[in-house]
Amino acid sequence: MTRADYCTVLFAALLLPYLYISQWTGDEAGINATIINDGETTQVSLAHDHTYEIDGALGTSIIKIEDGKIRFAASPCLGKQCIHSGWLAHAGEFAACLPNRISVAVLGEEPRFDSINF
Amino acid sequence: MSDQPNNPAEVKTGITIKTTPEDHLIAWLAALAIAIHIIESVLPSPLPGVKPGLANVITIAVFILYGWRTAVWVSMLRVLVGSILIGTFLSPTFMLSFSGAVASLIVLWLASRLPGEGLGPIGLCLLAAMAHMFGQFYTAYLLFIPHDGLFKLLPLLMTAAVVFGIISGIIVRSMLRHLDKRKNDTTIINSRNEQEK
């Protein structure tokens, strides 16, 4: 091994931790969320706990924000799919109540993919 | 050329393709690299883009023994013919393979310009493997998956590149030692030894 070889190995040994730290830490938590009520969007912050009561097509949906997470807490719909979606915390996560025409999406700095296929 | 009468092309058509000893050398080495490339393409991979890259062992060995120009020939022929034989020519796989090969050749060219004793087989293999990975990663990013989420894969891919780069460097080193030993055993005048003096 020459001196340049050692430098290359050292470079690689430094590059790898840098890549792991820069790419894998600070996974952006959702900062904001948007509530869409029949096409009408409202931006809400996830920073403060709050409960929203939204009047939709069927009745009132209750949307809760707690510890930076958001969820449907109650809904007048039959399937309760929106409630079963549970807590949403990460950018791109989404819950919708189609009967009541209300949906909730967590926003990050930029939208992420819903899914990726190879 | 003394070996021309053996050329079957001449017998049938009367057309002679003039080949130099260098052409034969490149063809043999490229054939070796292509064989490794194809065998390797059969191996399962845990992640798209992760491969041992053993065909690059040939590229680096050729670079050390015969210089950058020959390495370019062998590497490009390997990517081209390998992809045609596997059936991935001009597919994304080929694009990634090609861009990786180009990136590592560029790095090898830079390495050949280093002053002093320069890089040994391990440093060269490691650099080439990392350049290969960066090249194919950016091609994937620019052409196929233009989303920043792809960068989450980069640390893993780079780790694989570093590990396999060092392993193939060790392979090249022992290969060159073996070749040197054989050269000395058979008392062939070693032009490389003369150069070293």
Image (tube, helix red, strand yellow):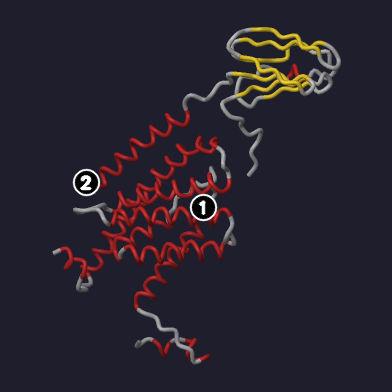
Distance CA(mark 1)–CA(mark 2):
32 Å
Query: Nearest the camera: A28 or B188?
Result: A28
Badge 2 marks a residue whose secondary structure is helix
Nearer the observer: mark 1 or 2; the answer is: 1
The residue under the point 60% across, 23% down is A90
Query: Nearest the camera: B27 or B189?
Result: B27
Is B130 located above or below residue A84 in the figure? below
Is A66 located above or below residue B121 in the figure? above
Residue at the left extreme, as displayed: B197
Number of disc labels: 2
Determine crowd level at label 2: few under 14, some 14-19, many 20+ residues with C-alpha closer than 10 A: few
Task: Return the residue at label 1.
Answer: B96
Q: Is B175 left or right of B49, judged from the image as shown?
A: left
* Amino acid found under the numbered disc labelled 2: Arg
* Quadrant the C terminus of chain B occupies: bottom left
Task: Provide the chain ID for the residue under circle 1.
Answer: B
Task: Return the residue at label 2.
Answer: A3
Q: Is A47 left or right of A22, judged from the image as shown?
A: right
Task: Provide the chain ID for the residue under circle 2.
Answer: A
Is B109 located above or below residue A43 in the figure? below
Label 1 and label 2 in one chain = no
Based on the displayed image, in which of its 4 quarters is residue A14 positioned? top left
Badge 1 marks a residue whose secondary structure is helix
The residue under the point 53% across, 38% down is B150
